[in-house]
């Protein structure tokens, strides 16, 4: 069995380390470097969003390199991600890529027993009642590694404008993720993270600077995958812009997968309160930002409309409280929840007095146009700050 996993951000890297650590052959489902510039799978439906097309292209490529089992998360609710698996299977079967599919639906949707049955296909020892504790420990380590990797990048991006050589930040992040992708041991991966944490502390910084600060929000895949967003993180860093994003993969696990588990295995009230406070982070600035996000979010969008648009709007609306100079919303063409969010953010910009720019991505858009708009937006914010 050779496993693959549709990549999003650093999830494919962490999944690869996890599977190899357990002795399972892993082949990354990475679309070719030119996939975001139009070289996608020709059978991809024209009206589907960019995340689906990149998933399809990556899985098609992984099959050609020997993968035979596809592991993929799904979700209930209004986002089309819940329909990706069936459509991917139909198209890939037609192309001769007859994967064995292991779909990890939310426990609240399929039940814990059905979810464990699907997982046992990957780990046959579970059928014999053995290895469950070992697997849980490895899953815990993989989740912790994901949080470490995302926090490492977030800290560098948040302070990018203070570094004397912003391009060194991009090189450090790229080198770290490249080394992580080559390791097959979780313990070794933590050693790598520790080493790169130390290297990040050696970068020269100048705190007398007053860089532009931007809040980056939008659809979760486009927000976290550099192929989908034309490496917007690297571009902002090169421009000396500090930025933060609200929706990450570890955030998704905490707010979607963990919440789904709680519906089946509810925590006692006291433990639930502690777990919630631990997840929310610490520090006065974090607490102030989260309180402002909750208040401002209710003012503009108080109900769920699909995806994580409610959270995106709340994060953008609290931008002034967080000390941001502007907001950039990014999402793929055809993403209905974020299209609605775009209309709401226009009102947020007017009421809160914070500039908002929206970037919509598809596989046919050139990078030069996006870069020009990003440069113009950051220049405008810099002049506004004086």
Image: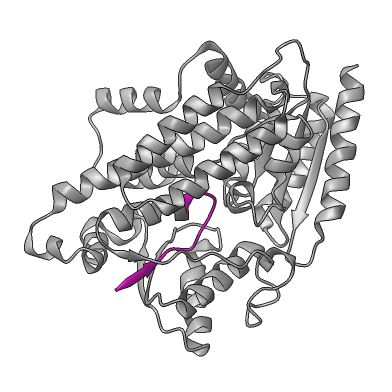
* Residue 262 seen in render: no
Quarter of the rendering occupied by the N terminus = bottom left
Q: How is the image coloured?
A: one colour
* Residue 364 seen in render: yes
Res 58 quadrant in image:
bottom right
- Highlighted magenta segment, given as a residue range: 1-11
- Nearest the camera: 123 or 44? 123
Q: Across the whole image, how many numbered discs are drawn on residues?
A: 0
Can residue 247 be found in the magenta stretch? Answer: no
Indicate the position of residue 76 as horizontal and vertical percent values. Answer: 44, 58
Instruction: Say which residue appears at 50% left-offset and 38% top-offset.
Output: 150
Indicate the position of residue 92 as horizontal and vertical percent values. Answer: 50, 82
Res 365 quadrant in image:
bottom right
- Identify whether 340 is placed above or below 92: above
Indicate the position of residue 136 as horizontal and vertical percent values. Answer: 22, 46
Indicate the position of residue 166 as horizontal and vertical percent values. Answer: 71, 31
Instruction: Say which residue appears at 53% left-offset and 75% top-offset.
Output: 61
- Nearest the camera: 62 or 266? 62
Can residue 7 be found in the magenta stretch? Answer: yes
- Identify whether 202 is placed above or below 332: above
Apparent side of residue 138 relative to residue 83 in the rendered image (left or right): left
Quarter of the rendering occupied by the C terminus = top right
Instruction: Say which residue appears at 37% left-offset and 42% top-offset.
Output: 189
Most common secondary structure along the magenta stretch: loop
Res 111 quadrant in image:
bottom left
Instruction: Say which residue appears at 74% left-offset and 71% top-offset.
Output: 38
- Nearest the camera: 281 or 338? 281
């Amino acid at each position: 069995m050779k496993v693959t996993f549709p990549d999003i951000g650093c999830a494919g890297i962490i999944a690869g380390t996890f599977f190899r650590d357990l002795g399972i052959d892993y082949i990354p489902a990475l679309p070719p470097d030119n996939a975001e510039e139009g070289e996608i799978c020709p059978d991809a439906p024209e009206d589907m969003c960019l995340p689906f097309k990149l998933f399809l292209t990556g899985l098609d490529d992984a099959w050609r390199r020997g993968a035979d089992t596809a592991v993929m998360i799904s979700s209930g609710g209004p986002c089309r991600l819940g329909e990706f698996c069936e459509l991917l299977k139909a198209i890939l079967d037609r192309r001769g890529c007859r994967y064995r599919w292991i779909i990890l639906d939310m426990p609240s949707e399929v039940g814990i027993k059905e979810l464990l049955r699907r997982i046992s296909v990957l780990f046959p020892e579970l059928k014999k009642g053995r290895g469950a504790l070992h697997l849980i420990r490895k899953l815990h380590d993989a989740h912790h590694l994901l949080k470490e990797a995302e926090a490492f990048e977030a800290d560098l991006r948040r302070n990018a404008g203070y570094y004397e050589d912003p391009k060194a930040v991009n090189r450090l992040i790229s080198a770290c993720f490249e080394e992580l992708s080559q390791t097959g041991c979780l313990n070794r991966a933590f050693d790598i993270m520790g080493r790169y944490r130390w290297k990040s502390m050696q970068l020269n910084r100048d705190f007398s600077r007053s860089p532009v600060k931007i809040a980056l929000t939008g659809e979760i895949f486009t927000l976290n995958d550099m192929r989908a967003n034309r490496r917007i993180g690297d571009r902002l860093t090169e421009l000396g812009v500090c930025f933060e994003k609200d929706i990450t993969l570890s955030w998704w696990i905490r707010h979607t997968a963990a919440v789904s588990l709680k519906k089946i295995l509810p925590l006692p009230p006291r433990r639930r309160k502690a777990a919630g406070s631990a997840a929310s982070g610490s520090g006065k600035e974090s607490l102030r930002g989260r309180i402002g996000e909750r208040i401002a979010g209710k003012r503009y969008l108080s109900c769920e409309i699909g995806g994580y648009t409610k959270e995106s709007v709340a994060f953008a609306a609290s931008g002034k409280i967080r000390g941001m100079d502007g907001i950039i919303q990014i999402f793929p063409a055809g993403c209905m929840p974020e299209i609605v969010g775009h209309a709401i953010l226009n009102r947020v910009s007017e009421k809160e007095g914070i500039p908002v720019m929206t970037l919509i991505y598809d596989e046919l858009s050139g990078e030069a146009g996006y870069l020009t708009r990003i440069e113009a937006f950051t220049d405008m914010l810099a002049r506004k700050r004086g």
